Image: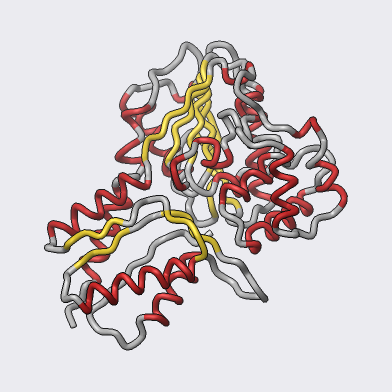
Amino acid sequence: MTDRRPLLRSIFDAAVAAAHPDIVLAQHLRPPPAGRVICLAAGKGAAAMAAAAEAHYLDELKLAPERLIGIATTRHGHGVPTRRIKVVEAGHPMPDEAGLKGAEEALRMAEAAEADDLLLVLLSGGGSANWIAPVPGITFLQKQQLTRALLRSGAPIGEVNTVRKHLSRIKGGRLARAGQHAAEIVTLAISDVPHDEPSAIASGPTVPDPTTLSDAHAIVAKYRLEVDDGIRAALIDPANESCKPGDKAFARAHFELIARPRQSLEAAAKLARAAGYEIVDLGADLEGEAREVAAAHARLALAARAEGRRVAILSGGELTVTVRGDGRGGPNQEYALALAALLKGTADISVLSGDTDG
């Protein structure tokens, strides 16, 4: 059997490069304002995005170092060296104390922004877990317990974030509200969500939120989540409604997607096609239970093999796992293990499945 690992790795690397901050960020950065650039970043790519912003402003544009400040909160193990922007490594997918402190510092910096400052918000996948700022009356422990229940329920990420947005002082547009005195709020985001919905990326801290408290309350009921009275009370408190279109917080706020899963998928397809494979493109927006998606993909692979076709089956998306028992891991491991079991003993089918496994 041909060792396809080098080819699989090169296809994966091409997909990652298509969304890497070093490649995609600089062309979207705004000119320096009269005052400071205040950079607030969250997500698994936060530190890399912050470092790329530093390189642009400090090295390319020669901005005085004291005019660039900020904080980047990323997942443990995803930090990179920076000069002016503080990097905090925090929990993902379960929030921890470091994420709590990172969110509080980000909110303080946003609130301190002045009329000649640019508030630069850099978002990537995982920002929802990295920035944790419970609403008044909710403890950090309660928020952790709810997050754990949501992640184990099998709810799609959109529903998970709907609940989180209504129990947060930073999500659902609230960061924009905190920084509304800045000259401009510019959010540059790397999408990791199906359909690239801005309000879903890192739970939309700087964009209007279309979901409501009623939606969040209904999701808790739908999945029969065991939550305490404090959470139930918070989900019916009008003070916890997220920011809606027309809120003055968005008067000077601009949002831009700088990378999408579709771009990564196209980069992967280009390389596979050049290697002589017929492309079966399943799209960048797949959702569903990881083991069920794995079964569907196994059927496609076995059918192509039976027909003698040389194909590359490519897809992206956000899968979920309904946890029953005390298992550990995430949707990527679930998908890979399910696929391995279904294809056991089958020659000439190679698989690469990549994720940070939230």
Residue at 45% x, 47% y: name it: 194
Q: Image quadrant for the C terminus?
A: bottom right
Residue positioned most to the right: 229
Q: Nearer the viewer, residue 35 or 307?
A: 307
Quadrant housing residue 133: top right
* Image coords of residue 321 (percent x, y): 56, 65
Write the residue at 48% across / 29% down: 187
Is 127 located above or below residue 120 in the figure? below
Question: Observer-nearest residue: 244 or 34?
Answer: 244
**In which image quadrant can residue 350 be found?**
bottom left
Q: What's the residue at 60%, 51% (across, down)?
A: 90
Q: Quadrant of the N terminus?
A: bottom left
Can residue 280 be seen in this snapshot? yes
Left or right of 282 in this view: 42: right
Residue 66 visible? The answer is: no
Q: Quadrant of residue 260?
A: top left
Q: How is the image coloured?
A: secondary structure
Q: Position of residue 107 (x, y in %)?
A: 65, 31
Vertical order, 33 against 75 (above or below)? above
- Indicate the position of residue 71 as horizontal and vertical percent values: 55, 36
Q: How many marks?
A: 0
The residue positioned farthest toward the bottom in the image shown? 345
Up-down: is 192 above or below 113?
Answer: below
Residue 175's x, y, as percent?
Answer: 62, 30
At x 72%, y 47%, the residue is: 218
